Amino acid sequence: MTDTTRTPSRAAPPAWLAASLMAAAMVASMGAVPGAQAATAAGEDRYTMADFAKVPKIDAHVHLHNADPAFVDAARRLGFQVLTINVDYPDFPPLDEQQRVAVALRQARPAAVAWAVSFSSDTSDRPGWLDATKQRIDAGLRAGAVGVKVWKNIGMSLRDPQGQLVMIDDARFQPLFSWFEARGIPMLGHQGEPHNCWLPLDQMTVLNDRDYFAHHPQYHMALHPEMPSWEDQMAARDRMVAAHPKLKFIGMHMASLERNVDELAAFLDRFPLAKVDLAARIGQLQYQSQRDREKVRRFMIQYQDRLMYGTDVSQPPQQSGAELLKEVEPVWRMHWRYFNTEETFKVSDLEQPVQGLGLPKAVVDKLYHLNAARSFPTAWKAAR
C-alpha cells in the first residue's frame, strides 16, 4: 500500500498558494463587492492598501532554496524581511543544502534574511544521535540561525523498530527539548495537520483542502483510521509543551488549531510563553470570519502579542526570484487587504466573499513585524 505516513508540505507552489493566486487575480479584476464597509471605526487608526509597501513587514515562514538574493531584494522593496526555515522534508533539498542556502542568503543580506536550522530524527533511537543533533544545531546557531524547526514527521511518519509511530512527547526527544528550554532556543513546532485532513471531503471547511485531499487520498487521514487522530496529535504536542514550561514554543500554522479561534485561544492561555504563526491557515481565519467576523477580530486584538504573519511559500532551487515574486506578491497584498480593510471580496478558498477585519494599526504592526522581531531578537541585523 502507498505509504500514508508521509504528508506533503505542498511546495512549489503549494495548493494554498495556487488558490490564493487565483483569488488575487479575481480580486484585481472585480474590486470590492458592492456594499463593503470602508469607513474606519471611531477612534481607530488603520492602514490602507496604499500603505502596503511603506509599512515594515516580516514574512516569518518561508522556505527559500535558491541562494540568489533577487527575491529577497524584491521583497525588501515591498517592505518585507523574511525568515527562511529549514525542514526535514523529503521533497525539499537535503538539510545540508537547505542550510548552505540559508547561510548564504543571510550573509548576503543580513538585514533582510533570518533563518531557522533543523535536524533529522531518522536515527533518534540510536546512541550518539542526541549529541550529534546538538552539535548540528549549535553549528547552525553560530552561523546565525535564530530557532530550530521540529516537523510533523515526528508523529506522522517516524516509527520505532516495532513499527509504531513515535510521537512528539516520546522520551527520546525530551533531553533535546530541555536543552532548547535551558538555552532559550526558540522551537518552531509543526505537529499534526489541518483538522480538515481527518474529515470527509464534503465536511472540509476550505476549498483548497477539499481539492487537495480529493487528488491525494494517500494523505487523507479520514481514509486511514490506523493513523493517530488529530486529537492524538494535539494531545501529544500539548504534553510536550507542558513538560517544558519555559520553552519558547512557536506553533507553526496556528499550532494546527486553525479550525476554531476559541481552541487556539485556550492553547495560548494554557501556555503563556507560546506564540503561533498564521502561515498557510489564513483561509481558515477567513472561513471563521464569514460566520462570526467580530469573534475573529476580537481574537486577533486580544492575542495581538502572540501572533505572527507568515505564508509558507516555498522556492525550489531552480525558481528565479522574479518568478517567485510574481506568485507571492498578490498573496501578500490579498492578506494585507483582509487584515487591514473592511472591504468585502472573493477568495478562492471560500465559495462566498469575505469581509476584511479592519484591524487597528497597532495590532497590524505586531502581527506583521514587531512580534517576530521580539521573538527572534538576533534576526535581521546588518553587519556593524
Image (cartoon, rainbow, N blue to C red):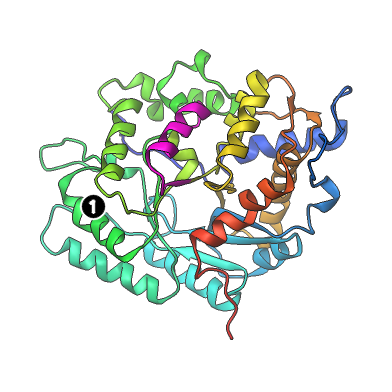
In screen coordinates, is 129 left or right of 369?
left
- In-front residue for pair 18/73: 73
- In-front residue for pair 292/78: 292
Quadrant location, the C terminus: bottom right
Q: Residue furthest top?
A: 202
- The image shows residue 292 at horizontal and vertical percentages of 64, 21
- Residue 187 occupies quadrant: bottom left
Q: Secondary structure at mark 1?
A: loop
Please say whether residue 4 is visible from this viewpoint. Answer: no
Quadrant location, the N terminus: top left
The residue drawn where x is 56% and y is 65% is 66
The residue drawn where x is 38% and y is 71% is 140
Please say whether residue 71 is visible from this viewpoint. Answer: yes
- The image shows residue 246 at horizontal and vertical percentages of 32, 54
- In-front residue for pair 267/176: 267
Q: Amino acid at mark 1?
A: Asp
The magenta region covers 258-275
- Residue 237 occupies quadrant: top left
- The image shows residue 28 at horizontal and vertical percentages of 84, 38
Q: Which residue is mark 1?
A: 122
- Residue 34 occupies quadrant: top right
